[in-house]
Amino acid sequence: MSQTMTLPVSRSTILLGDQSLDVADLEVIDFEKIVGKDPVETAKLLKAAESTGFFFFTFSGSFSENLADYLRTAYQNCHGYFTKDLDEKMKDFREVDRGYKHRPGVESYEIARDEQQSINLPTPFAENASATHHLMDYCDTIVRVCLRSLSDSIGRDGSSSLENSHPPGGPSDSGLKLVSSPTLARTADVPDSTHTDSGSITLLWCEKWASQLRTKESKEWLWVEPKPDCVLVNVADYVQKETGDRLHSPVHRLTQPADGVVDRYFVSYYLRPTH
């Protein structure tokens, strides 16, 4: 049973072309202050994880600059990779949740954290392997700082810490997932992708409108505004279960606000518990 009272999600209205979008007002949290254990920012993080389960991290200094460089390379890699012929990409297919996957409207390529130094990356990721590995390292740092802060905030430390299920270097399915999901000519043709994430903490970068969350209290769908200088973060199922539903794994989906075909790439990272 949840230990917190569910509060209505604050929202605002944004005009996008001739459309009016209802947008969730998500917390924007200073990552550097979470690293420094700032009590105000730490409380904001806990509140967001207990309520919507979604929030943004913003970054500063050299961390922000380096991360932006690695992300630019990742988006370029996505374009170079996903525009290759399907037969070429299918050479990277793997039965496990790694490598290349394809289904109507969505393609992905996933690199597992525990094999990032041993796997032979395809072109163009191989030509930019250093930037790809550095991006994974930065992502792993972000999710682990987040998990540690949340664990400490709810009194899960020592032998009960949430970190104990995520030892660095342990075998797991944590990893970087790169996705191509162009918008469709007709919004009505977008397939239903309603889901929650099965891991622990998820990071998502996307420069275009793509995500909606479903509120806990009213089951309404609200848009998540893309913020180029931030990363969207959400709690996932494992953490919700381990905290007795105190932290919330939100229902969300991939969609589009308007008709028209436009390239759209996602850079995501999933922290998952060890096997």
Image (tube, rainbow, N blue to C red):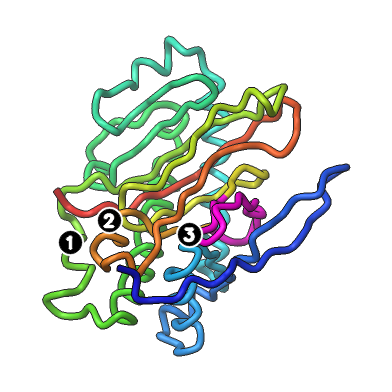
Q: Which residue is mark 3?
A: 233
Instruction: Indicate the quadrant containing the N terminus: top left, top right, bottom left or bottom right.
Output: bottom left
Q: CA distance from mark 1 to mark 2?
A: 10 Å
Q: Pinpoint residue 225: horizontal percent, then vertical percent.
A: 67, 54
- The mark nearer the N terminus, 1 or 2, is 1
Which one is in front in this view, the residue at disc 1 or the one at disc 2? Answer: 2
Q: Which amino acid lies under the numbered mark 3 shown in the image of this protein?
A: Val
- The mark nearer the N terminus, 2 or 3, is 3
**Vertical placement of residue 193 versus 73, above or below:** above
Which one is in front in this view, the residue at disc 2 or the one at disc 3? Answer: 2
Q: CA distance from mark 1 to mark 3?
A: 19 Å
Q: CA distance from mark 2 to mark 3?
A: 15 Å
What range is drawn magenta here?
Answer: 213-231
* Apparent side of residue 23 relative to residue 159 in the rendered image (left or right): right
Q: Residue at x 38, y 27 (%)?
A: 122
Query: CB under 8 Å between callouts 1 and 2?
Result: yes
What is the quadrant of residue 240 in the picture? bottom left
* Apparent side of residue 101 relative to residue 221 in the rendered image (left or right): left
Q: Residue at x 25, y 23 (%)?
A: 95
Q: Which residue is mark 2?
A: 238
Q: Choose between 270 and 47: the one closer to the eye.
A: 47
The residue lying furthest to the bottom in this view is 39
Q: Secondary structure at mark 1?
A: helix
Q: Which residue is mark 1?
A: 165
Residue 138 visible to the viewer: no
Q: Choose between 139 and 18: the one closer to the eye.
A: 18
Residue 41, numbered label: none
